[in-house]
Amino acid sequence: MAERLKDIFFTKNSMNAFADVIQRFYPEFDRKKFIKLVFDESFTDKELTVKMRHTTECLKKVLPETYADALDILKEAAPHVKGFEALSFPDYVALYGRNDWELSLPALYHFTKYSTSELAIRSFLDKDPEKVMTFVAKWAEDENPRVRRLASEGCRPRLPWAMALPKFKKDPSAILPILEKLKDDESEDVRRSVANNLNDISKDNPKVALEICERWYGQSKNTDAIVKHACRTMLKAGDKRALSIFGYSDVTTMGVKNFKLEKTKLTIGENVHFSFALTLKKKSKVRLEYAIFYIKAKGQHSKKVFKITENNYRSGTHTISRKHSLADMSTRKHYPGIHHIALIVNGIEMAKAAFELETKDA
């Protein structure tokens, strides 16, 4: 199983290095007290973002009481701290700087050059989106790509690992000028953030996202890539308007035959092998996917869609086979029970089969 992020960062070694940096810029820093505060009895078991917040709270206890003085120290230290540990600096602003925006927003701008302030900016956006978006508009034109990325990433309505922005989920109109500014950005990271922001918007306001995607598609290679990534949720859901942007063919001329699983009883850790025949009455552009309906700890099923391929196929019959790993990962744990696998052609489920998953010692 892949090593978990929470076991890679905020370790004894990394936190000692973190403390060394703080002490370099704050000689009065009580290093011993800080390390003792951080590594309390429950620290090892905490999740990554909880470790970050805990570190922030421990910093508060050993830095100067005055917010401005503490901020000066952290700003000097920021270029010298890497990894997830560095997120404690913008988190300090989010936690203790909510009443001093004139210091806090420029500090987030500074910190994002060395890590990212995308999580920390959200409490400010939630409180006064109109005020913060005036800063964001300027950041979208900054020479530093990390700052430009923050302009898009920070205002995503549904940023993972972060609080959602209900006002932007309801009405994303304030975000759209930022995305327009950045859609042809020279940085791929910035453009990918634009695509992720649009994908977020599509979950609550699909018509808004689709209008933008239809307008951008065909403008440039960059915007085409953004649109493709931005439409991924709608494509997986079989949204006809999203599918039409990319010219996928009408499914009425398509079919699936002989969908078979090599085995219908498997053990956690094995691969499920499946094969099928795709039949086409005419040359077609096809997006092939499969969905696994995983059984969860409480017995309910959770659907996850995976891409097989997308291609132009000639008319006739095409035999396709694939395998899917059922090994536990850091992001997915498997449970015994009846699972399902479905084939999806241009957004339409066309065949489905079941298999039983057992534990290794069953």
Image (cartoon, rainbow, N blue to C red):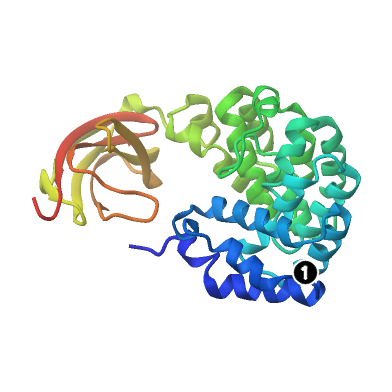
Residue 188 seen from this side? no
x, y (%) of residue 174? 78, 30
Q: Residue at x 40, y 27 (%)?
A: 250
**Above or below: residue 85 compared with residue 19:** above
Q: Identity of the amino acid at label 1? A: Ala
Front one among 98 and 187: 98
Residue 68 seen from this side? yes
**Above or below: residue 23 compared with residue 136:** below
Q: Residue at x 83, y 30 (%)?
A: 130
Q: Quadrant of residue 176?
A: top right
**Above or below: residue 30 compared with residue 269:** below
Front one among 36 and 315: 36
Front one among 160 and 234: 160
Q: Is residue 158 left or right of residue 137?
A: left
x, y (%) of residue 213? 63, 34
Q: Residue at x 86, y 51 (%)?
A: 106
Q: Which residue is mark 1?
A: 77
Q: Quadrant of residue 245?
A: top right
**Above or below: residue 281 compared with residue 50:** above
Q: Secondary structure at mark 1?
A: helix
Q: Is residue 238 left or right of residue 256?
A: right
Q: Quadrant of the N terminus?
A: bottom left
Front one among 343 and 63: 63
